[in-house]
């Protein structure tokens, strides 16, 4: 990013923060913070449930992505603001005044994203069903007031962490996993009927990280799959694209040469999931 682009971005983000701060404090009942538009799929069930129970003030949606479609086409009852992912976002968190802030980003208070001095109920929404202590830092959830738990393991693990670290007890909500609910509802009509003679369709949708499937073995994976008669869709985790664009570039260049290979860069869309055998 050039210096000029960085300056323009700062002023754009600052305008987003000013617009948010212009909302009267009594209307800031529920604020959602999203790192990017890919997290809306986790917020949406909460938003819909909230709107069914409350027709008063709008839900305020703060995003770090200037391409988030909610900035231009928010659903009824949602008011969106962009604060970027730099200094203005840090200012947003540092001075936040709201009743509840719901977020999917862990490690509150650990790095530069701090709790506000104002009385805010910080609520963590698990965007993964995995264990709290296998892929996260030990203190990842220590500074939240409330946790929306995807399953009983989240309750047990959070209580064990509180006891071992001498932390105060959080409010734990047996919330479930809205994304899974949506997938099950969409598949309620039964499995997809494959046309006669169609080859099996395989979806490869791995997680991310230095030991991730695509990060370590993308070429071996594609070599193995291209020698089969399968139709293949590969859907990388968004973090792979963010942290390892070289992996994605290599992946795309190889997929484009294979007529039976497809690339899915829509993490919220579930079409490739339901289309796979």
Image (cartoon, grey):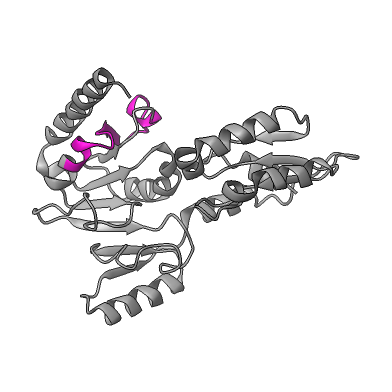
The residue nearer to you, when weighing 261 against 254, is 254
Q: Is residue 29 above or below residue 246?
A: below
In the image: residue 161, left or right of residue 227: left
Q: Is residue 107 above or below residue 194?
A: below
Q: What residue sits 17% from the left and 29% below the top? A: 14
Q: What residue sits 48% from the left and 64% below the top? A: 130
**Measured from the top left, where is residue 256 in percent x and y?**
70, 27
Across the whole image, how many numbered discs are drawn on residues? 0
Q: Quadrant of the N terminus?
A: top left
**View extreme (top): residue:** 4
Could you tell me if residue 265 is visible in this image?
A: no
**Measured from the top left, where is residue 102 in percent x and y?**
29, 52
The residue nearer to you, when weighing 31 against 92, is 92
Q: Is residue 152 above or below residue 126?
A: below
44 drawn magenta: no
**Measured from the top left, where is residue 10 in percent x and y?**
21, 27
The quadrant in which residue 258 appears is: top right
Q: What residue sits 11% from the left and 45% below the top? A: 95
In the image: residue 184, left or right of residue 116: right
Q: Is residue 130 above or below residue 50?
A: below
Could you tell me if residue 131 is visible in this image?
A: yes
**View extreme (bottom): residue:** 163
The quadrant in which residue 82 appears is: top left
**Measured from the top left, where is residue 83 in percent x and y?**
24, 34
Which stretch did the figure color magenta? 68-90
Q: What residue sits 60% from the left and 41% below the top? A: 235
């Amino acid at each position: 990013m050039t210096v000029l682009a960085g300056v323009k971005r700062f002023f754009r983000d600052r305008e987003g923060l000013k617009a948010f701060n212009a909302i009267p404090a009594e209307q800031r009942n529920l604020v959602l913070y999203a790192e990017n538009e890919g997290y809306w799929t986790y917020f949406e069930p909460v938003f819909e449930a909230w709107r069914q129970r409350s027709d008063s003030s709008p839900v305020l949606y703060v995003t770090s992505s200037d391409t988030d479609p909610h900035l231009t086409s928010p659903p009824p009852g949602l008011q969106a603001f962009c604060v970027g992912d730099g200094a203005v976002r840090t200012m947003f968190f540092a001075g936040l005044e709201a009743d509840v802030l719901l977020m999917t980003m862990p490690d509150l208070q650990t790095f530069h994203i701090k709790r506000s001095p104002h009385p805010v109920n910080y609520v963590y929404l698990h965007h993964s069903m995995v264990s709290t202590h296998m892929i996260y830092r030990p203190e990842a959830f220590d500074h939240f007031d409330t946790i929306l738990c995807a399953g009983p393991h989240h309750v047990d693990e959070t209580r064990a962490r509180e006891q071992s670290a001498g932390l105060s007890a959080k409010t734990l909500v047996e919330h479930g996993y809205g994304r899974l609910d949506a997938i099950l509802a969409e598949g309620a009509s039964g499995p997809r009927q494959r046309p006669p003679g169609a080859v099996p369709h395989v979806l490869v949708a791995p997680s991310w990280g230095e030991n991730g499937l695509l990060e370590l073995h993308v070429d071996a994976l594609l070599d193995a799959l291209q020698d089969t008669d399968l139709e293949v869709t590969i859907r990388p985790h968004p973090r792979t694209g963010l942290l390892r664009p070289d992996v994605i570039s290599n992946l795309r260049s190889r997929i484009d040469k294979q007529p039976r290979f497809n690339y899915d860069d829509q993490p919220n869309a579930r079409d490739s999931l339901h289309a796979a055998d």
